[in-house]
Image (cartoon, rainbow, N blue to C red):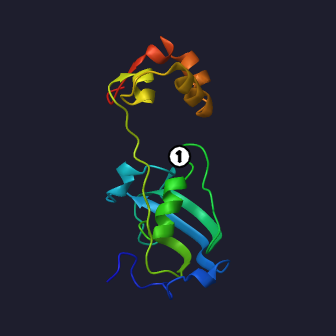
Amino acid sequence: DSVLGDDGIGPEIRDGDSGHVSLSLSKVTCHWTLNDSLTSQYPDGDKNDDGGEGAGAANRALDSVTIDLRAGELTCVIGPVGCGKTALLLALTGELRPTSGAVARKYRTVAYAPQEAWIMNGTVRENVCMGRTFDADRYNECVAACSLGPDLNRLPGGDAAVVGDRG
């Protein structure tokens, strides 16, 4: 048995298949169930108890999403916190099962590296430098590239503010 199961998986995508639909979601709705271990790890979605048959008390993660992804094309998933980016990626990989709609996958393997938010105990500057010697030019370039300026201006103490895994 594969991780993705047998439903909807066709032949493996080959180099010559570029441009063909390799993954399709059609009117897919997914829910985080209360007993789902992913609920606490990936809390995207709004609270909703109308999860449909078998969903039980759940949080809606995706609501009637339709998308075709083509082999050889780059697709970017962007949006604000809590809009369902992680839920979409997990649905695409088969880790979040749909409560309604259809999923068609034409691949055998998939790789996904989830975002793992973390921060060291220390100042913002120390977190940006990550243990390297402070280089003002490189630091300022990094802050500008990441658009951290407005955030640093709001922090008491700016980049000298102490942050950490406990807030």
Q: Residue at point 44% right, 81% down? A: 108
In which image quadrant can residue 123 be found? Answer: top left
How many residues crowd around disc 1 within 10 Å: few (fewer than 14), some, or many (20 or more)? Answer: some
Q: Secondary structure at mark 1?
A: loop
* Residue closest to the eye, 99 or 160: 160
* Residue closest to the eye, 106 or 46: 106
In which image quadrant can residue 70 be found? Answer: bottom right
- Residue 123: tell me if it is visible: yes
Find residue 138 and report its horizontal and vertical position in percent: 54, 27
- Above or below, comparing residue 8 to residue 57 in the picture: below
Find residue 28 and report its horizontal and vertical position in percent: 57, 70
Find residue 62 and report its horizontal and vertical position in percent: 55, 60
* Residue closest to the eye, 145 or 149: 145
The quadrant of the image that shows the C terminus is top left
- Residue lying at the far top in this picture: please name it: 157
Residue type marked 1? Gly
Q: Give the residue at mark 1.
A: 82
Q: Residue at point 52% right, 25% down? A: 139
Find residue 4 and report its horizontal and vertical position in percent: 40, 76
- Above or below, comparing residue 118 to residue 49 in the picture: above
Q: Residue at point 39% right, 81% down? A: 5
- Above or below, comparing residue 71 to residue 117 in the picture: below
The quadrant of the image that shows the N terminus is bottom left
